[in-house]
Amino acid sequence: MDRTDATEDSGSDSPPAPPALGIGMIGYAFMGAAHSQGWRTVSRVFDLPLRPVLAAIAGRDPLAVRAAARRHGWAAAETDWRALIARDDVHLVDICAPGDLHAEIAVAALAAGKHVLCEKPLANTVAEAEAMCAAAARARREGRIAMVGFNYRRVPAVAHARRLIAEGRLGALRHLRFTYLQDWLVDPGAPLTWRLQREHAGSGALGDLGAHIVDLAQYLSGERLTGVSALAETFVTERPLLAAATGGGRGIPSGGLGPVTVDDAALFNGRLASGALASFEATRMASGRKNALRFEINGERGSLAFDLERLNELSFHDHTEPAASSGFRRILVTEADHPYLQAWWPPGHALGYEHTFTHQARDLIEAIARGTAPEPGFEDGLQVQRVLAAVEESARGNAVYIPVPQG
Ligand code: SOE
């Protein structure tokens, strides 16, 4: 166990605390809360070379940002992200703001000599993502790290799946099948938040959910997608406007309707560099499905299946076993030698969604201390952005219409 207890620090002969890494976070809605949880817990669970200090949080509304600072444990609150970046006690800038702010903040933070963690998708466009990568490459030469927050890589069962694939337990991959299903837009009365506006979010279910499964497909296979063919749809084209947003997708309705300018759902197929075929479905319109990120990967020697709503489990079929006794079996991913689990509870004591953010913070701190390239870096975020752009282009133009019989 490398778990440490707060009381262990207090003894006079205890080892000196590791140097502080001041964190400054921009945004305090759902992702801000999740990242705060990660920063708060990480040094109490893992032995780390640097000690994260929750220095300051930034948001535009002075009352709301002060309340968020108190709730989530941040020492100070700022109402201007530029002021947060300028603080001497901030060494790492964590960007949890809407997508249209990612590029400007990340480029400014890297230029100011800070490390950066940026929520997914990396940007709203390929051009923005390229500018962010160029800034990250310059900063890297001066020892700064830029990571993109694809947190589902840090589910222990997902990291274990990658390990099994890398060890060759599935052999050559043939099929990767990914779905990410949510239902918070089924109600046509759900308000027109920034996530439904192209100028703020870049795209809809595609960037919000599709980005995760594209990243996972490339991470798990160790390959890049080389081409896609796609369909996308906006089922509810107008939604209630908010006079004022109160956070978490809620707000005060203005009485009017405004246009939805992003997709509600995107379906696409792709081919990996090895020739394996992949399919993806991202939607916020799957009634009854709350956060159903699922995948099944079939290879010549075996298959793996995963469901985020049962995230401590991985299903594995070993196709080299005799047919009479083979079949999918459940691996309970809670053993000490499973990824990340050495620091947590005894076998069988499950983890949850929030632990992915603790693991993300751990991996980023290790990369900063060692000066190694972070995974996933901004280049990985750019590659995902290129796939998202290709999906949008395909969905716009490549449909082949089937003639409607006359008469
Ligand atoms: C909303 O659809 C959302 O919060 C995504 O933005 C997150 O990335 C995903 O992890 C959960 O759902």
Image: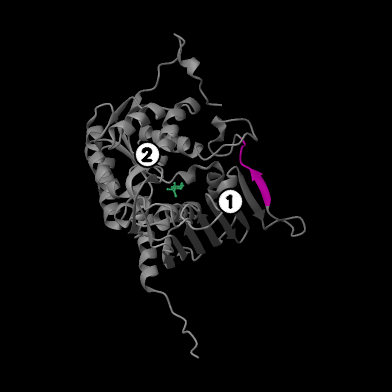
Residue 88 at least partly seen: yes
Tell me if residue 125 comes above or below residue 365 in the rendering: below
**In-image side of 229 versus 131 (left or right):** right
What amino acid is labelled 2 in the image?
Answer: Thr
Residue depicted at 36% across the width and 59% down the height: 260
In the rendered image, residue 385, in percent from the top left (x then y), is placed at 36, 56
Say which label, 1 or 2, has the lower sequence index: 1
Residue depicted at 35% across the width and 61% down the height: 389
Residue 51 at least partly seen: no
Image depth: mark 1 or mark 2 in front: 1
**In-image side of 101 versus 281 (left or right):** left
Number of residues whose C-alpha sits closer than 10 Å to that of mark 2, classed few (under 14), some (14–19) or many (20 or more):
some
Q: Are marks 1 and 2 in contact (CB under 8 Å)?
A: no
Check residue 334 for magenta coloring. yes
Check residue 30 for magenta coloring. no
**In-image side of 329 versus 42 (left or right):** right
Number of residues whose C-alpha sits closer than 10 Å to that of mark 1, classed few (under 14), some (14–19) or many (20 or more):
many
In the rendered image, residue 243, in percent from the top left (x then y), is placed at 31, 47
Q: Which stretch appears magenta?
A: 329-335
User: Nearest the camera: 204 or 321?
Assistant: 204
Residue depicted at 52% across the width and 26% down the height: 2
Tell me if residue 365 comes above or below residue 257 in the rendering: above
Tell me if residue 128 comes above or below residue 44 in the rendering: below
Residue beneath disc 2 = 372
What amino acid is labelled 1 in the image?
Answer: Phe
Residue beneath disc 1 = 306
User: Nearest the camera: 51 or 169?
Assistant: 51
